[in-house]
């Protein structure tokens, strides 16, 4: 095998296939067998020729001896002419006569040859026939005996090649027949092997074709072999494997690039479409638009539906969005919508995106986004329900607003966030949005670092009994105090904390510090109630009651000294869930207050079912007592309702003495605001408790 590999390696270019290799092997085998046969014949002829020459020489020598004896000739009378005429035979190479002393007395020859002296000597000495081979001539020396006396020796030399020639002449027809057989048999064998191996070459070519197709992203094709043997079975197995592989490839492609619920292109497929658009040479000639739609109503609906119903709704919404985009595409882009239609994809849960590949100008792109948003926001019927999708859109111009898909999608989402803040509308990306996003990202990073360092502190604003003016409690407000003692306004970090979900960690830090300080003041003899604001994110956590109880136990604070303030909107969002949060804590003695009362949509029936202890009148009503003619009536109504429900009332944002006087006359028990002091750190507030006095108006830069 090593020889054949080296031999085949001498042929450059395409490697020799197995079928061609089998053909070469067959031809070489037939040729080798023919050569072996010829060599065997030659060897046989050679052996037979030597032996035949010996036998012929012995016979000829005996015949000559007989003839010499019958003619009664003396050796001196025998001459060359007589020998040649009387005793010549075609295979005989030479005939020699020696006397008893070994002297040559006569010679009859065809050609000259060396004399076999040693053989002649042995014949004279032994008086017996001797044979030897010299230079391709087989010599036979026979003693001449007359009257029982050896008078000489006759030597007959027969050329071995002459005997072989005679044999070969006889075998020539056989050689001719063998050669003719080989000339016919070798091509027939090659053709037969080639034909039998052709299916194997077909299979190899099919495998090469499948490899090329797989590299190009396709694996379709079939191979037809009808031989009725193993090749046909192998071809069938390959066809079945190829079919399964192509089916699997299509399934993988669908999983990778198609959204299973809506059958729309998914996020990865949308990125590829953006790549193709940006890579095209005409992408800078006519701008395209990337529009991201957020269907907020769809998100809320999906949260309330089961899996099958959610999938059905998603399909219905996808069809509606696709129909709306197609209709707007025809209206705005007209002919371009046929030549280069828009691509709609579902990026994630309730977020869809459109790539509109060409627009004449930005105004046309804006009209497309606005019309698409308006069309999607139209009410539609589903399961006998009238639904709206609450759609907002953010759009970017490509490639102006981004040179890669990720940048375009990110900027479109920034524009979407701005559109969501302004209502259900469409907004295009501006550079200021990027700067704002960068600022928010930096702020979030700083907030996380501040939480690790413990920079969020509890500042305490006094809560005053309006009738007596004494401090009866405090509200713990979050303040961000940097290492350089600068204070970040809550108006800056609170919205960012709510947006990023860090508000729960900030609230926990403030609650923990407030409880530890309240417990310390109680041990000093100042057992005041400390109110702590609870964020919606904290209140929705099922583990919230356990967390509050653990903080109380760690601080060794009486539960009666803690008051939790929950906004009206959070309570009314899910009253049953609010009850689950409130009951375990209220059983421990924790008090609850409704913060910002009057700004939400609570009803008297809802309030009567929820075990709240305190109503806090929002500061906008207190501030409007002088300027808003409806504010006094609203405040009086709240106070009357609280009295009916046997709840205490705390008025927020009191800054003027006449507002405090109005509230006292109407029966409001407690108040807080800059009139009684701004929020201050725990040491300063503790000192205020120890002095036991409440200063007059003291407005600081802190924002409650």
Image (tube, helix red, strand yellow):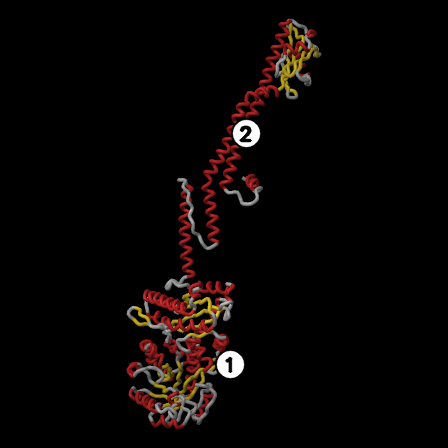
Whole-angstrom CA distance, mark 1 to mark 2, is 102 Å
Residue 682 picture location, percent across and down? 46, 85
* In-front residue for pair 342/150: 342
The numbered dot on residue 274 is none
Residue 161 picture location, percent across and down? 61, 21
Residue 264 visible somewhere in the drawing? yes
Q: Residue at x 46, y 52 (%)?
A: 213
Residue 76 picture location, percent across and down? 70, 7
Relative to 579, is 331 above or below?
A: above
Q: Which residue is mark 1?
A: 482
Q: Is residue 590 left or right of residue 431?
A: left
Image quarter (top left, top right, bottom left or bottom right) of the C terminus? bottom left
Relative to 634, is 212 above or below?
A: above
Label 1 Cα neighbours within 10 Å, binned few <14 / some 14-19 / many ≥20: some
Label 2 Cα neighbours within 10 Å, binned few <14 / some 14-19 / many ≥20: few
Relative to 621, is 234 above or below?
A: above
Q: Is residue 129 left or right of residue 572?
A: right
Question: Which of the two discs, 1 and 2, labels the residue nearer the N terminus?
Answer: 2
Q: Is residue 656 left or right of residue 31?
A: left
Relative to 634, is 542 above or below?
A: above
Element on which disc 2 rests? helix
* In-front residue for pair 638/402: 402
Residue 326 sits in which quadrant? bottom left
Q: Which residue is mark 2?
A: 36
Element on which disc 1 rests? loop
Residue 441 picture location, percent across and down? 49, 74
* In-front residue for pair 538/183: 183
Residue 259 sits in which quadrant? bottom left
Total tally of numbered discs in the picture: 2
Residue 342 visible somewhere in the drawing? no
């Amino acid at each position: 095998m090593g020889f054949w590999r080296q031999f085949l390696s001498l042929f450059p270019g395409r490697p020799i296939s197995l079928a061609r290799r089998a053909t070469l092997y067959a031809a070489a085998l037939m040729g080798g067998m023919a050569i072996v046969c010829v060599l065997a014949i030659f060897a046989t002829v050679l052996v037979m020729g030597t032996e035949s020459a010996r036998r012929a020489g012995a016979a000829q020598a005996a015949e000559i001896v007989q003839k010499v004896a019958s003619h009664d000739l003396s050796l001196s009378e025998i001459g060359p002419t007589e020998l040649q005429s009387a005793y010549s035979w075609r295979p005989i190479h030479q005939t020699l006569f020696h006397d008893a002393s070994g002297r040559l007395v006569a010679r009859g020859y065809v050609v000259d040859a060396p004399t076999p002296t040693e053989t002649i000597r042995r014949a004279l000495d032994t008086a017996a026939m001797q044979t030897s081979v010299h230079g391709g001539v087989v010599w036979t020396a026979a003693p001449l005996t007359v009257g029982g006396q050896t008078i000489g020796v006759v030597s007959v030399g027969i050329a071995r090649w002459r005997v072989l020639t005679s044999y070969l002449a006889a075998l020539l027809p056989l050689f001719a027949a063998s050669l003719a057989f080989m000339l016919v048999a070798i091509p027939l064998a090659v053709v037969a092997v080639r034909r039998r191996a052709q299916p194997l070459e077909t299979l190899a070519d099919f495998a090469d074709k499948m490899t090329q197709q797989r590299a190009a992203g396709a694996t379709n094709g079939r191979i037809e072999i009808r031989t009725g043997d193993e090749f046909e079975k192998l071809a069938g197995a390959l066809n079945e494997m190829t079919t399964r592989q192509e089916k699997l490839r299509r399934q993988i492609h669908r999983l990778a690039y198609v959204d299973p619920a809506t059958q729309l292109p998914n996020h990865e497929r949308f990125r590829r479409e953006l790549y193709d658009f940006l890579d095209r040479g005409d992408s800078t000639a006519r701008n395209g638009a990337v529009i991201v739609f957020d269907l907020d109503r769809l998100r809320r609906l999906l949260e309330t539906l089961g899996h099958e119903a959610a999938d059905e709704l998603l399909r219905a919404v996808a069809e509606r969005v696709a129909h709306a985009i197609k209709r707007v595409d025809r209206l705005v882009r007209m002919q371009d919508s046929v030549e280069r239609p828009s691509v709609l994809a579902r990026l994630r849960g309730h977020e869809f995106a459109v790539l509109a590949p060409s627009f004449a100008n930005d105004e046309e792109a804006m009209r497309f986004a606005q019309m698409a948003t308006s069309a999607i926001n139209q009410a539609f019927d589903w399961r006998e329900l009238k639904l709206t999708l609450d759609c907002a859109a953010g759009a970017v111009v490509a490639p102006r607003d981004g040179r890669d898909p990720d940048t375009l999608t990110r900027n479109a989402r920034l524009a979407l966030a701005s559109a969501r803040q302004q209502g259900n509308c469409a907004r295009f990306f501006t550079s200021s949005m990027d700067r704002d996003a960068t600022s928010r990202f930096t702020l979030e990073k700083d907030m996380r670092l501040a939480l690790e360092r413990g920079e969020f502190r509890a500042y305490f604003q006094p809560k005053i009994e309006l009738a007596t003016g004494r401090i009866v409690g405090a509200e713990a407000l979050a303040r961000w105090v940097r290492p350089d003692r600068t204070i970040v306004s809550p108006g800056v970090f609170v919205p960012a904390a709510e947006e990023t979900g860090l508000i729960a960690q900030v609230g926990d830090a403030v609650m923990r510090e407030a409880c530890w300080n309240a417990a310390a003041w109680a041990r000093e003899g100042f057992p005041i109630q400390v109110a702590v604001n609870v964020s919606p994110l904290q209140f929705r956590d099922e583990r919230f009651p356990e967390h509050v109880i653990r903080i109380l136990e760690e601080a060794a604070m009486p539960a009666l000294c803690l008051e939790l303030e929950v906004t009206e909107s959070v309570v009314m969002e899910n009253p049953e869930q609010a009850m689950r949060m409130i009951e375990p804590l209220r059983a421990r003695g924790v008090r609850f207050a409704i913060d910002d009362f009057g700004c939400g949509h609570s009803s008297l029936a809802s309030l009567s079912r929820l075990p709240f202890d305190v109503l806090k009148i929002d500061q906008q009503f207190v501030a409007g007592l002088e300027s808003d003619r409806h504010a006094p009536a609203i405040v009086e109504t709240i106070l009357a309702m609280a009295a009916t429900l046997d709840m205490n009332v705390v008025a927020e944002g009191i800054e003027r003495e006449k507002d405090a006087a109005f509230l006292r006359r109407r029966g409001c028990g407690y108040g807080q605001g800059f009139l009684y002091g701004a929020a201050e750190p725990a040491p300063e507030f503790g000192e205020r408790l120890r002095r036991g006095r409440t200063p007059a108006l003291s407005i600081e830069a802190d924002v409650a």
